[in-house]
Image: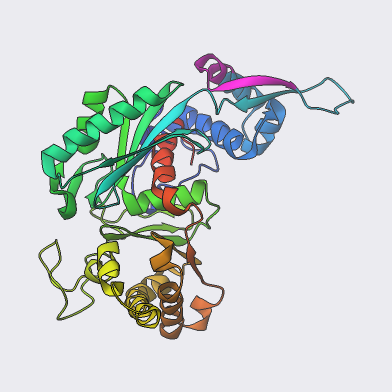
Amino acid sequence: MATATERSGTGRGLGARLRATSKVLPEHARAHNRSLVLQHLFHEGPTSRADLARATSLTRVTISDLVSVLITEGLVEELGTRPGQRVGKPAILVGLRTDAYQIVAVDLTEHGHMRGAVLSLTGQIQVRRQLDIDGRTGDELVDLLTRFVRRLVAAANHPVIGVGVGSPGIIDLDGRVVEAPNRGWYDVPLAELLGERLGLPVHVANDANTAALGEFTYGGATGSMLVVTVGAGVGAGVVVDGVRVHGQRDAAGEIGHVTVVDDGEPCACGRVGCLETVLSVPALRRAVADKSQEDSDAALASAGRVLGVTLAPVVSALNLTEVLLSGPRDLLDGPLREAALDTIRQRTMPAINTGLQLRMAALDEDVVLAGAAVLVLSAQLGVS
């Protein structure tokens, strides 16, 4: 199966669109055209070869050849004729075999446990698992993760095409964890290690970037949005004009370690007063502990204003249409979210904030799992 680099000819930055939309250079044409076909079948459902040719602007000969190969690979199947068609020779519909393969996904966002699932290609969770981390970090955590994924693969009832992992930290395009202080991971080639141990393609990305993929593919989010993940730490995934933004050192969206309080609490990164010390789930739980409802709401609103101050220049610079929050609803969806939106509106121009939405992620607690599945779909099939 084609890799992401083979499909697009580039692997990073604003040149790597999430969804293929047109023809490319000859040396990348076949892999790219394959992606066009699978992308259309994934999002539009069963269609005829003639309609595929029209939708992708590829010739009927090219479509016929690609569909034949995909049928041989077991990814596509013929489904008979379209119901109700009467005039002319009946067109045979072809569709993606979304139930023939499965994906294993893991979410490492939470501090105390890892969450995993076996998903269909369309994002439906077939099996769900959770495992306590018990304070493990570094190599011990990699070993625990390996065992956890093995159990998930064993639980699948169809062939697994790959494993996707959403993890906190700065992670490069090869799945190497450059820095994840909360996990004790520094320069850890996590995708390579897991791939060697499991004998499967493994794709690892920052959990917030992964969440953005999940919302874009399965959650109906717009092509210019930011997903803020709130768990053991705080991160953000950025999509601008349908393109996931990586940044110079694959650290785009790393807002959790922006200093927001000059005399704040110590942070795991070694600095003081980072956004993570105010907005992470442990920090928010401490802020509302043993307080009345009124005082709890005030504490959450205060954290929301800090978030709004942090996000206002990002929203303005990128002209985003949506900001999504992913994390516990009891903490985020209420005074915190409302205060953050009010603060962003106060600090940006009407041309920027008119129509801006700040809402909870549509996929709720499963957003990183869904995005981890998209990591595999994108790398193995060219679908996002």
Q: Residue furthest top?
A: 72
Residue at horizontal 54 percent and vertical 26 percent from the top: 99
For the magenta stretch, what is the residue range? 68-80
Could you tell me which quadrant the N terminus lies in?
top left
**Quarter-of-image position of residue 21:** top right
Q: In the image, is 108 to the left or to the right of 364?
A: left
- Compared with 382, 352 (above or below) is below
- The reply to whether residue 26 is in sight is no
From where the camera sits, is residue 175 visible?
yes
Q: Is residue 300 left or right of residue 38?
A: left
| Left or right, residue 366 beside residue 165 | right
**Looking at this view, is 13 or 132 the one in front?**
132
Which residue is the extreme one toward the right?
87
- Way the structure is coloured: rainbow
Residue 73 lies within the magenta run:
yes
Question: Which residue is drawn at the image coordinates 21% and 44% (left, top)?
Answer: 133
Quarter of the rendering containing residue 131: top left
Left or right of 315: which side holds 357? Answer: right
User: Percent position (x, y) of residue 161?
Assistant: 41, 26
Tell me: residue 227, above or below residue 123: below
Q: Position of residue 228 (x, y in %)?
A: 37, 62
Query: Residue 115 falls in which quadrant of the image?
Result: top left
> In the rendered image of this protein, does residue 32 appear above or below residue 265?
above
Q: Residue furthest left?
A: 270
> What is the number of callouts on the image?
0
**On screen, 358 above or below 35?**
below
- Counting from the top left corner in percent of width and height, residue 89 is at 83, 20
Residue 343, position as x, y percentages in the image: 41, 81
Q: Is residue 355 magenta?
A: no
**Residue sitting farthest toward the bottom:** 346
